Image (spheres, rainbow, N blue to C red):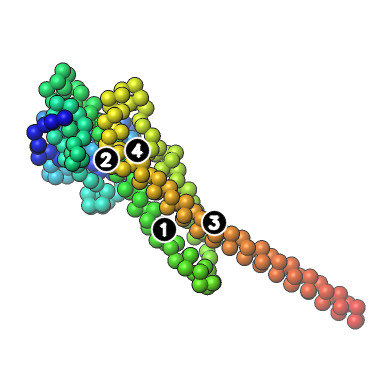
Amino acid sequence: MTGTRCSKRCKKIWYHPSTFLKSFTSMCLTKITAKTEMSFFFRDGSMVLWDVCPAQTRELFSVIQHVQVGGYERSDVIDLYSEAIDFTYGKQAGLLPTGEMVLSYGQNNWAKAQILEKIAFSHGMQRSVKISVIEEISDRLIASIKQIPDVLTEKRALKLDQKAVMKTMGQLLSLRGLINLHLPLNETPEAYWEEPWLEELYSKISRELDLSARIRNLNRKLDYAHQVVDVLRSEMVERHHVRLEKIIIYLIAIELLFEILHFLV
C-alpha cells in the first residue's frame, strides 16, 4: 500500500443524535464542496467533512442551521466534539502504520470506489466522535457520585435525595441504551455485510480508533456507577422501611396510651 503524502484533512463533527437533518441518511453538498471536498451527513446527527477548509466549514454550518434541531453550541462542536485525521492516496485503500488513511487512486472505477471508501471510513470516524461525547457525559456522571464510596468507608451519613437518585439512575440507563441499543456502536453497519472490502475498511478504522475497547471501558464504568447508585437506592429503601416501622411503633404506642387512659378513667 503506497501513495504520495498529501496535506489533506478529514474532519468529523458530532451533533445531537436523531435530531439533526432527519430527512437525510447521507448527502454531498455540491454547493459548497468541489473536487475532493465532500460532506457526509448521518441520520443520528453526525457529519464527516473531507478536505473542507475552516471557511467552508463555517459556511456549511450556516447552510444547515435552519434544519438543525437540538444541536450543541457551535463552539462546543468545533472545540470539543470534533476530531481530524490525515488521508492520502495510493494504489489500495487502507491505513498506514502511522494511522493515516489511504484512498485508492488510478484503478478501474476509482472515482466511484473512492466515494464508497470515504463512506466506510466516515462510518467509523463518526462513531468515534459519538463515543467521545458519551465518554464525556459518563465522566461527568461518575464524578458526581465519586465521593459516595468515601462517605461509606468513613461511615458518615449519606445525604439522599430520592429525585436525584432516580435521575442519576435514569441517566445511566439512557447512556446504556445509547451505547448498546439506540446507537449500536459496536456493530458493523448492515450496508457492508455484502461488501467485504468495505467492511474491511470499516473494521480497520474501527480498530485504529479503538472503538471496541472504548465501548468495553464505557460499559465497565457504567457498571461501577450502577453499583454505586444501587447502594444509594438500597440505602434509600432501607431508610424508608425504618421510617415506616417507626411510624407503626408510634401508632401502636399512641393506641396503647389511649387504652391505658380509657382503663384508668
In the structure shown, which secondary structural element does the residue marked by tag 3 occupy?
Answer: helix
Marks 1 and 3, how far apart in space? 14 Å
Q: Quadrant of residue 257?
A: bottom right
> In the rendered view, does 224 fall on the left or right side of 41?
right
Mark before the other along the chain sequence, 2 or 1: 1
Who's the residue at 70% across and 70% down the image? 246
Mark before the other along the chain sequence, 2 or 4: 4
Label 4 amino acid?
Asp
Q: Which residue is mark 3?
A: 230
Q: Nearer the viewer, mark 2 or mark 1?
A: 2
Label 3 amino acid?
Asp
Q: Which residue is mark 1?
A: 142
Marks 2 and 1, how far apart in space? 27 Å
Comparing 118 with 199, the one in front is 199
In the structure shown, which secondary structural element does the residue marked by tag 2 occupy?
Answer: helix
Q: Nearer the viewer, mark 2 or mark 3?
A: 2
Comparing 109 with 259, the one in front is 109
Q: Which residue is mark 4?
A: 44
> In the rendered view, does 260 fall on the left or right side of 242?
right
Label 2 amino acid?
Glu
> In the rendered view, does 199 fall on the left or right side of 91?
right
Who's the residue at 45% across and 43% down the image? 177
Label 1 amino acid?
Ile
Marks 4 and 3, how far apart in space? 31 Å
Report x, y in % for residue 58: 17, 44
Tag on residue 208?
Answer: 2
Mark before the other along the chain sequence, 1 or 3: 1
**Which of the image's four quarters has the N terminus?**
top left
